[in-house]
Image (cartoon, coloured by chain):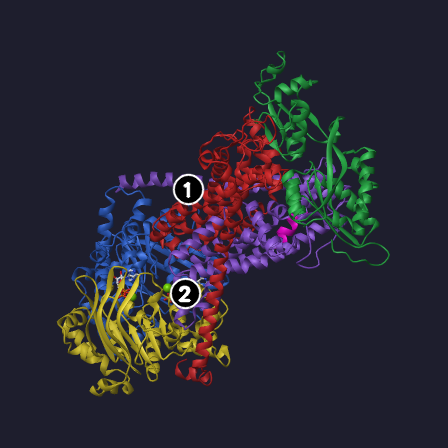
Chain colours: A blue, B yellow, C green, D red, E purple
Amino acid sequence: MMHEQLADIVAERFVTRPPELQIDLTPGLQREETILETRGLSVWYGGFQALRDISLAVPGRRITAIIGPSGCGKSTLIRCFNRMNDLIPGFRVEGELLFEGRNIYGRGIDPVDVRRRIGMVFQKPNPFPKSVYENVAFGARVNGYVGKLSEIVERALRRAALWDEVKDKLRQNALALSGGQQQRLCIARALAIEPEVILMDEPCSALDPVATLKIEDLMRELAERYAIVIVTHNMQQAARVADYSAVMMMAEDRAGEMIEFGPTRQVFTTPKEKRTEDYITGRFG
Amino acid sequence: MMHEQLADIVAERFVTRPPELQIDLTPGLQREETILETRGLSVWYGGFQALRDISLAVPGRRITAIIGPSGCGKSTLIRCFNRMNDLIPGFRVEGELLFEGRNIYGRGIDPVDVRRRIGMVFQKPNPFPKSVYENVAFGARVNGYVGKLSEIVERALRRAALWDEVKDKLRQNALALSGGQQQRLCIARALAIEPEVILMDEPCSALDPVATLKIEDLMRELAERYAIVIVTHNMQQAARVADYSAVMMMAEDRAGEMIEFGPTRQVFTTPKEKRTEDYITGRFG
Amino acid sequence: GDNSEGGGGLSGTIVGDGSSTVFPISEAVAEEFGKLEPDVRVVVGISGTGGGFKKFCNGETDFSDASRPIKDEEKEACANNGIEFVEFQVAFDGLSVMVNPDNDFVECLTVDELKRIWEPGSTVDSWSDVRPEWPGESIALYGPDTDSGTFDYFTEVIVGEEDASRPDYTASADDNVLVQGIAGDEDALGYFGYAYYVENTDKLKLVYVRKDALEQPEVAEFMRFYLTEGRPLVAEVGYVEAPESAYQEGLDLIP
Amino acid sequence: MGVTDIEAVGPASRIRPRGPLEARLRHGREAAIHGVLFLCAFVSIFTTLAIIATLLEETIGFFGEVSIIDFLTDTKWIPGLGGGPGGLEPHFGILPLLSGTLLVAAGAAVVALPVGLLTAIFLSEYAPEWLRGIVKPILEVLAGIPTVVLGFFALTFVSEDIIKVLFPETKIFNAASAAIVVGIMIIPMVSSLSEDAMSAVPRSLREGAYALGATKLEVALRVVVPAALSGIVASFILAISRAIGETMIVTLAAGATPNLTWNPLDSIQTMTAYIVQVSLGETAQGSLGFRTIFAVGMTLFVMTLTLNVISQYLLHRFREVYE
Amino acid sequence: MTAAEAGFRRRLFLRKATAVGFALLCILATSLGIAALALLLVDITREGVGRVSWDFINSFPSRKPEQAGIKAALWGTIWMMGLTASFAIPIGVGAAVYLEEYAPRNWLTRVIQTNIANLAGVPSIVYGILGLALFVRAMSLERSVLAGSLTMALLVLPIVIIASQEALRAVPNSVREAAYAVGASRWQVVSRQVLPAAFPGILTGIILALSRAIGETAPLIMIGALLFVPFTPSGPLDRFTVLPMQIFNWTSRPQPEFRENAAAGIIVLLIVLLTMNATAVILRNRFQARARQ
Ligand SMILES: Nc1ncnc2c1ncn2[C@@H]1O[C@H](COP(=O)(O)OP(=O)(O)OP(=O)(O)O)[C@@H](O)[C@H]1O
Ligand SMILES: Nc1ncnc2c1ncn2[C@@H]1O[C@H](COP(=O)(O)OP(=O)(O)OP(=O)(O)O)[C@@H](O)[C@H]1O
Ligand SMILES: [Mg+2]
Ligand SMILES: [Mg+2]
C-alpha cells in the first residue's frame, strides 16, 4: 500500500465533506464547550490494567472518533462514559470522568440518570428477545415519554434506516433479523430515548455501505444538537464524519494509552506522533 | 461521492494486489474446478422466503466474495453451505447444493462430515464460554487430532494474528476478550480443524485495519490450498481479496436473489447488471 | 426367615411388620432378644395394621403386629395364599378421654354424657349443650380414625354400638397428633389409646405369626421370649400387660 | 510476526482424516446414544403407565360399588363408617378432599411464588457474588428438611404461635398453617430454579437495557424476567405440583376432617392426607375403605394431569413469543 | 425542554423510590425464607444438640431413648442416597438432553413433556404404592435398599429432568452453532459444550431432587421399609431403614426423651444433606462464575 496515495485519499475525503460541516474544522473549534471529559482515567479488569491515564475532552455538538488497534481499550473507554462497566465484576476505575462538569463516578451520581442522557450502541448487536416494536419502545416506556409510542418507534426506525425493512415485521422477534438489521435496531433503540450524548461502539461494522452512509448522515444530523462519540475501525469513516479524533495504542504491558487527540484533519494529515502517522498511513484502507 | 473516482480506486486496488494472485484474474479461470455449487436454491424461514433460485459455482482454491445490502440473504446463503440452518426451526430448502458433486442436502449425507470439511466463521463472534485454549482445541479434539494439541492451538492463533495478544491469557475465559479479539479467536477456531472450504461471514467487521490486512493475507495464503467464501460489506475488501464476486439484492417481496456472479474484476469494472453498477459505484467507500 | 444353623446359638432373619402402635413392644423385645441371640436378625416395620396383614398374607413377613383382630377379608387373603397363622395377645392398650389442660370446668364426664356427645346424629355442639352451666363455646372433637381398634372399642363401650359415631371430628391415626391437637385447642375434647393416661384398659395388642415360620427354632424361640421376658417390657414402653392366662395360652401354641 | 512465525511452530499439524469405517462407527455410536437417551425419556412414560396400572384395578373395583356421579357430586366424605351395624350412611363425595387439596396448594403458592421469585431476583440482580453463593444453598436446605419435621413445625409453631395468636378462634389443625409451611418448603424450588434461569440471561441484554436509562428494577422486571420466563414458569409448575402432592405436612397439620370449605382457618383434609391415613392405618386391605385410596389417588392423578396439560399448552404459547 | 426535564426528574425520583422499595422487598423475601429456616434450626438444635454424640451415631435403635442410636438409619440413608443419585441423575439428565437436544417436535415428545410435568405432582405415597407393586413384588427385590432407591429415583426424576431441561434451554444457540461448525457430532456438541454450559442449572436440579429424596418418609413406609433394623446394609439387596423414618417414629412416641432423639436425628440428617449439597454447590458456584463472564 502506498502511503502517499492514501494520504491523498484522506485529503480527498475532506474535500468532499458536506460544506456546512467544514466550518467545524477551523481552529476556532478549540474553544468549543466540553461536554464530557476524562482526567487521568485508568481502568483495571481485576489485575489487568486496560487503560492508563487517559485525558480527553469531548466537545458538545460534535462527532468525536476513537480509533486504534483491536484490544487497545476503545470499548473499555467508551463504556466508561455511561458507567456500563459497573456491571463487570473486577472492574475498577481511577481518575475523573466529568459530564457537564460533574464526575460521573463521584458520589451522589445516579448511573440511571447518566445513562438516560448518554445513550449507547454496543459493538455486538444485543436486541432484547422481544418484538421489534418492543425493542424500540422499551426506552420510551421506562423513561415515561409522553406522546404516541408508535410514532416514537416509527421515527426512530426511520432514522436508523430500518423502517422499510421491518415495517411488516414489527411484532416479530428481533432475534430473527439479519445481523445488520439487528445493529440498526439497536441504533434505533438508542435514538428513541433522545439522549444528549450518543456513544457508538462500531455502529457500522455489520452494515453495508448504503446503510453505513445513512447512519453517517444521521450522525451528522444528530451532531447539530448532540455530542457523538464513535469507536470505529474504518479510518475512512472517521475521516468522513468525525470532527475530532482520538488515537489509542497499547503500551508494552498491553494497557491502552491515548497517543493523539485533536481535530480530525490535523490528526490525519499532520499527526504529532510518529505512531499515529504509522498507524493511519501505513494501514489506511 | 464521485463514481469515476471510485472506479479509479477499484482499479488501483487491483494494481496493488500481490503479484502472485494476479494470474487468478485471467479468463482461464473460468475453467477452474467447481467445489461447491448451488442449483436453483430457494430458502424459507417459516412462511418467509429468504432466498430465491440461487445458482452459483464456487471454485476450489479461490476466494469468492458475496456482497449485497443488509438483509438480502447473504448469511442465509453461506449458512446453507455447511447446513448450519438445519438448526433453525421453520427452515426449509429447495433446489440442490453440491459439494464435490454430491448434494449435501441429499439422503445419506452426514452433516457432521460436511461441517468438518467446510469450516465457518460467524457474523457475530460466538466463542464458547471456556478458556481461549479450549476454544481453539475443541475442533481438533472432536475430530481426533493426532499430535501435540498445544502446537495446533498456537499455530491457529498465530495465523489468526491473535497469538501475541492472548499468549498470556490462554486459560482465561474467551468472553473476556475484546470484540475484535473474539472475532479472531473464532477465525483461529475454524482454522484449527483445517477444513477444505472456509466460510466467513464478515470476518473482519470487528477488526481494525492491521488485523484485517493480516486476515486478508491469511485468506490468500489459505486460498492456495482451499476454497474460501466470504461475506463482506466492505467492497474494497472484496476487490482486494476476492477472485470471484457474487452480488445479491432483495426482490420486491424481500427474497434474496443473485443478480451477478463472475470474476471480481469483471463484476467491479464491467458489471452486466445496471443494479450491480449502481450498488458498487454509487456506494463504494 | 432364611434359616442357617450356626455355632452354639440360633441364627437367621425374622421379619415383622404392622401396626405402629405395637411397634414399641416388638422393638423392645427384638432388642433384648438380639442381646441373647446375636446371630438372629429381627427386623420390624411400621406399615400399619392393614398394610402389615397384606404383607403377612403375601408371605412376606414372619409375624405381624396388629392393634385389632384380623378381619375376614384378611383371613381369606391368607387362606388363598396358603398362609396359616397363630394369634398371640401381647398387651392391652388404654383408652383415655382428654380435654385441654387449660379447661377449668370439666372435671369429669359421665359415660352418658360422652354417649350424647359422640353418638351418630348427636345434637351437641357447645359445652352448654352437655351441661347448661358450662360455657357456650362449641366443642372441638378429636379421635382416632375410624378403622382403628380404639375407635371400635370406644364406640362399642361408650356409644353402645360398634362403629357408631358422629363423623364431624378430627380423626388421626397418629395418637401423638391427637395429643398435640388437644393440647393446642382450648375447647378440645378427644379420646385415644395410650395406656399411661388412664387406668381403664381393655384394648388388645396382638401379634400374628405364620405357622410354618413358628416351626423354625429361632422364630419359636423369639415368640417364647416375647411372651415371657417381653412382659415387663410392655409396661416399660407404655402399655399394660395382658393377663397371665393370655400369655400362657400363647406359650402353649408354640411347638 | 507474520508467515515466518507460523512456520516456526513446526510441521503442519494434521487432523486425522476420517475413513469410512470410522464414519460408520461414529454413526453407530451416535445412534446408540440417541437410543439410550430416548429410553431415559421413556422411563417417565413407563412410570406413568405403571402408576395407572397399579391404581386402575382397585379403582375400577371401587367404582363398581360407588357411583361415579356420587363420587364427583356428593359434598360429604364419610368413608368406612358404614362397616358396622347402626353406622352412618357412608358418603364418598370427593369434593371436600378436592377443596382441601386446592386450598393448601393455593395457599402454598401464594406464599412461595412471590417470595421465591423476589428471592431469585434479589440473588440474581442485587446480591454480590459471595452472598449469592451463601444464601442460595442455605435456602436449598429448606427443601431437604424431612417433611415430618416440617409437619410438626406447622402444628406446634405456625398454628399455635402464629395463626392462633392472630385468629384466636382458629382450631389447632387448619389449612393455613399447613399451606404456609408447604409454601416455605417449596420456596427453594422457585428461588433456585428461577435464579438459574435469570443468571443465564446474557449480560449484553442487561447492558442494552441499562444503556437506555432503565433502573435496576426495570431491567429485572422488563428484561431479565421476560427473557427467563420459560425457566420461571417451569419452576412455578414444579413447585405447585410438589405442593399438591405433599403428604406428611398436611397429614400432621391440616387436620383430618374432610370439610367442603374455602376458609383457610378451617380444619380440612387433603387427598394425600387421606391416602396416608388409610394406607398407614388399620383398614383391611381389599376392603371398600381401602379401595377408596386408589380412587382418590386416581382422581389426584387425573387432576394434576389436567392442570399440566393446560399449563403446557400455555407454556408452549409463551415460548413461541420469547425464544 | 425544562418542563419536560422537570417532569422527568419527578418521575426519576419516583422510579428510584420504587426501585429502592422493590430492592427492600426482595431482601425481605429472601430474609423470610432464611428466617423460617433459622427458626426451625434453632428450635431443633436447642432440643437435640445435647444428644448428638458418637454413641448416638454409632448405636442401633433401642426402646430406651438414652441408648437408642441411628447407626442403621444413617447408613441406610447413605446407601439409599447413593443408589438414588446413581439412578436418577443419569436417567434424568439423559431424558432432559433427549427432550431438548434430540427430540423431534412431534406428539410423542409433547406427551412425554406433559407427562413429566404431571409426574412431578403425583404424591409421594402413590410412588410408594407403585414401588411396592413393581420393585418389591413384581421384580422381587423384596424390601431392599435397591427397591427403596428405585422408588425414590422415580419420585425425584421429574425434578432432575425439568431443572436440567431449563438449564439446557438457557444455553445460547450460538454455542451450538459454533460447535457444529467445527465438525462436532451432535453428541459431541451436547456433551462437550452444551452440558458443561448448562451444568450449574443441572446441579440445582440435582440438589433439589436429592434434598427431596433424603427427607421423604411416606413412600418408604408404603413399600415397607423397616424401622427396627439392628444392622447396617452390606449390599443393595439388604434390608434397611432411613433417618426420616426413625425421626418420624421418634416424634410420635410419648416419652419426651424420644423427641430429643428425633431432634438429634434431624441434626444428623441435615449434616448429611449439607455435605451432599456442599459438593454440588461448590461445583455449581465454580461453573456459574465462569458462565457469568
Ligand atoms: N431465523 C430467522 N427467522 C426468520 N427470518 C430470518 C431469520 N434469519 C434471518 N431472517 C430474515 O431473512 C432475511 C435474510 O437474512 P440474512 O441474515 O441472510 O441477511 P444478510 O444478508 O446476512 O444481512 P446482514 O448483512 O444484515 O447480515 C432478513 O430479512 C432476515 O430478517
Ligand atoms: N470483561 C473483561 N475482563 C477482563 N479483560 C477484559 C474484559 N473486557 C476486555 N478485556 C481486555 O481489555 C483489553 C481492552 O479491551 P476492549 O474491549 O476495550 O478493546 P477494544 O479496543 O474495544 O478492541 P476491539 O477493537 O477488538 O473491540 C483487551 O486486552 C481485552 O482482552
Ligand atoms: Mg471493542
Ligand atoms: Mg448476515
| Residue E105 appears left or right of C198 | left
Place residue B49 in its image quadrant. Answer: bottom left
Residue D105 against residue A203 in the figure, above or below = above
Of residues C188 and A3, the one drawn nearer to the viewer in this rendering: C188
Residue B152 against residue C23 in the figure, above or below = below
The residue carrying mark 1 is E19
Residue A252 in view (yes/no): no
**In the image, ligand 3 is in what quadrant?**
bottom left
Q: Amino acid at mark 1?
A: Ala
Of residues C122 and D201, the one drawn nearer to the viewer in this rendering: C122
The earlier-in-sequence mark between 2 and 1 is: 1
Chain ID, mark 1? E
The magenta segment:
E268-276
Coordinates of residue E123 in the picture (x, y in percent): 53, 45
Q: State the SS at label 2.
A: helix
Looking at the rendered image, the disc whose residue lies closer to the viewer, 2 or 1, is 2
User: Marks 2 and 1, Cα distance to the nearest angstrom?
Assistant: 37 Å
Residue D65 in view (yes/no): yes
Residue, x 42% and y 69% (percent of image)? Answer: E179
